[in-house]
Structure formats: structure tokens, C-alpha cells
Amino acid sequence: MRVDFITQVLPCAVALRVVLLWYAEWHDVTFRVKYTDIDYEVFTTAAQHFVDGASPYLCSTYRYSPLVAIALSPNIYWYKSFGKLLFVIGDIWTGVLIFKLLRERHLSERLASLSACIWLFNPLTLTVSTRGNFEAVLATIVVGILYCVEKRKPLCAGILMGLGAHLKIFPAMYIAPITLFMDSSYTGKTNNPPAVFTKSRLQFVLSSALSFVTLTWAMYSRFGDEFLDKAYFYHLTRRDHRHNFSPYFLPMYLTYDSGISGVLSLLGLLPQAILLLFVSVYLFKDVALACFVQTLIFVAFNKVCTAQYFIWFLCLFPLTVPYIDLSPWQLCQLGLLWIVTQVFWLGTAYILEFEGINDYLSIWFASLTFFLSNVVIVVAFIANHKKHV
């Protein structure tokens, strides 16, 4: 059956988000527990401070680049849901880029459309943008980087990389596989022997650095050390002892008031770094798969892991599925494993939060099972990847 992306998939995706935006307005004035993400209130408060001529960091829980508050200034002087509209546009554009990138790889329109549907009609991605979560825009930037790489536009890819790393540092880990991917054959020319410092590599790395430094220096010049502390250093030294999906949460909780907690926080970076480097070298020939596996590893091995982080790899998942040598049933089994272990964790967390039963060991065991499910998916994708043509 023919699936037309422009006339069938895209209008349905837009309509669904419009309905959810309307529902969010109704829900927030009707129920005590709001549909809108608490982070959106943080963004709006920070934007209010900026409009008033003050620092967005007067909002104590704002820990992002000032660019986010600046971009959401229309929340104050125009329409309170402007930011949600912006995030939804980014969300939709991510789906469009996924479709265009897969078509660039010569995938059929039907398969490219179905792959884009994984993003466009995913319940998690639908709610993230319409609740006002900033991760939807980061997904657009990440997929945009890979689209520029596929289109052989290293300068554009580098500019987007600098922007993404400025907003949230994690996209910087994609620099390694993308740079390796831009070898002598990247532009269709071959050198004998292969050149290390190719023109594309230099353009990408230098434009990434220039974009990141320019944006970061501009924000530092205006907001000073407070910007660096809140937007970057806080996340590097963060010690979150509250329960979350990460298996690190219980050791952090038990050692929170001692010096060991800080050591654990730093040691947690070591396995991440080793695995990310390995994936960069082993999978760079399929750069989208390398970035997907990197992100899944980064999230699974992170010292803090929350549901909003899943968006970071879910936007890359549709780019990898067509090139994984697994049957639909095997893919469904992996998906079911991921969902069931996640639901298991949510069940144990519910008992703690709503029933008041402090069974932290059960939550930690659930965190371990969810962690192992991510490891199984990583191993399955690495073992069964096939090069696209």
C-alpha cells in the first residue's frame, strides 16, 4: 500500500499536535495537576526576568543557556504558549528531516514515511513538545546535523553542532563519529594514501568550534560566571540522590552526605567515555547508527536518567531501523523488553511516591533491569547492523 508523506502522514501529525495543544489549554485550567511540563513554567519565569532586563538565572531552577529564555520572550509579551508552538514546529520538522534523510539514502517513500511515523506518532514525542519541553528542539538540531552530513554540507553541520552543544553539551559526542565519517571518500573523491586532514573534516570541526565559542562567549559576556555555572558546570558535577532510572541513584543516595558521592559521580563518566569512543571507531561508517548507539549508551550509563532524555535517542531510532538486520518480530521483542522494564520501574516508583512505602531496593532493582534492557538493545543493534546503500 502506498503511503504519501506530504498528503497523508504530515497533515495527520500536525492535526494531532494541534488537538493536544488545545487540550493542554483546557486541561491546565480544569485540573489541579497540570498537563504543561513544570520546566515550561521555569522557561517562562526566566523569560520574564530577561524581558525585565534582569538575568534569567534569577529563576533558581533555570539551568539552560540564556538563548532559551531569549527565544521564549514572546511568552511574556505576546502569547503564553508561544514556546509550545515553537517546540511543536521543531517536533514536526524533525519528522520531515527524518523522511528527507532516508529518501536521500534512497529508501523507498513508503519505508521512509513509515520510519518517520515512529517519531511523529510516538506518544512520548507527542507529549514532550505539546507539554512544553525543550528536548523537542534539541532533537531537531541533532537530526538536522545528520541531514547536513548526508547532504555533504560540513559547514552547515558544524554550525548546527556548535548550536546544539551550546544549548546542551551532549551533541558534542557526535563530533568523533561524524569526523571519522568525513574521510577521503566522503565527497566522492579518493586519495592514495587516504588523507587525515580532509577539507570536509576541517570545515566541520572548525565551524563547530567557531559556532560554539561564538555563542558561548556572547552569553558569557552578558551573563558572566553564573551562565557557566548553571548551564554547564552544574550538569558535570550534579549529584542527584532522588530516585530515577539510573542504577547510580541508590549509591548516590546512600553516600550523598559524604565525599564518596562526588567520587562516584566522576567515576561514572569513565565507562561512558570508553564506550562512546569504541562506538565512534567501530560504527562510524553508518554515522546515524553510531550516533544512536552512542546516545543510548550515554543515557543508560548516565548518573541521572529521566524520561525526557529518551527523546535524545528516539529521534535517531527511525534513521537506524531500516538498516538493522532484525525481523519485525525481533524488533518488537526488543521494544517490548524496553517498555516492560520501564513500566516495572514506574510501578516501584509509584509505590514509593503515592503509597509512602520506602522500598528503595525494589526501585534500584527495577533501575538495574531497565539498564540491562538498554544494554541488550545496544548489543543487538551493534551485532546486527548492515551498511546502507
Image: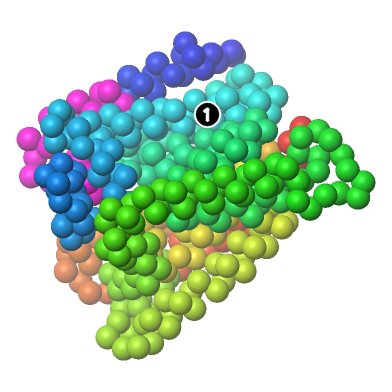
- Indicate whether 257 appears above or below 55: below
Q: Image point 68% across, 47% down: which residue? A: 202
Instruction: Specify whether 193 is left or right of 283.
Output: right
Q: Looking at the picture, how far across and down is residue 39, in whole percent?
A: 23, 49
Q: What amino acid is found at the position of numbered circle 1 in the picture? A: Leu
Q: Image point 68% across, 29% down: which residue? A: 105
For residue 76, say whether it is visible: yes
Closest to the observer: 327 or 388?
A: 388
Residue lying farthest to the front in this orientation:
221
Instruction: Specify whether 86 is left or right of 328.
Output: left
The magenta-colored residue range is 17-43
- Indicate whether 80 appears above or below 165: above
Q: Tell me which corner region of the image, top left, top right, bottom left or bottom right, holds residue 355.
A: bottom left
The secondary structure making up most of the magenta span is helix
Q: Quadrant of the N terminus?
A: top right
Instruction: Specify whether 210 is left or right of 199.
Output: left
Residue lying farthest to the top in this orientation:
7
Q: Looking at the picture, how far across and down is residue 309, in whole percent?
A: 40, 52
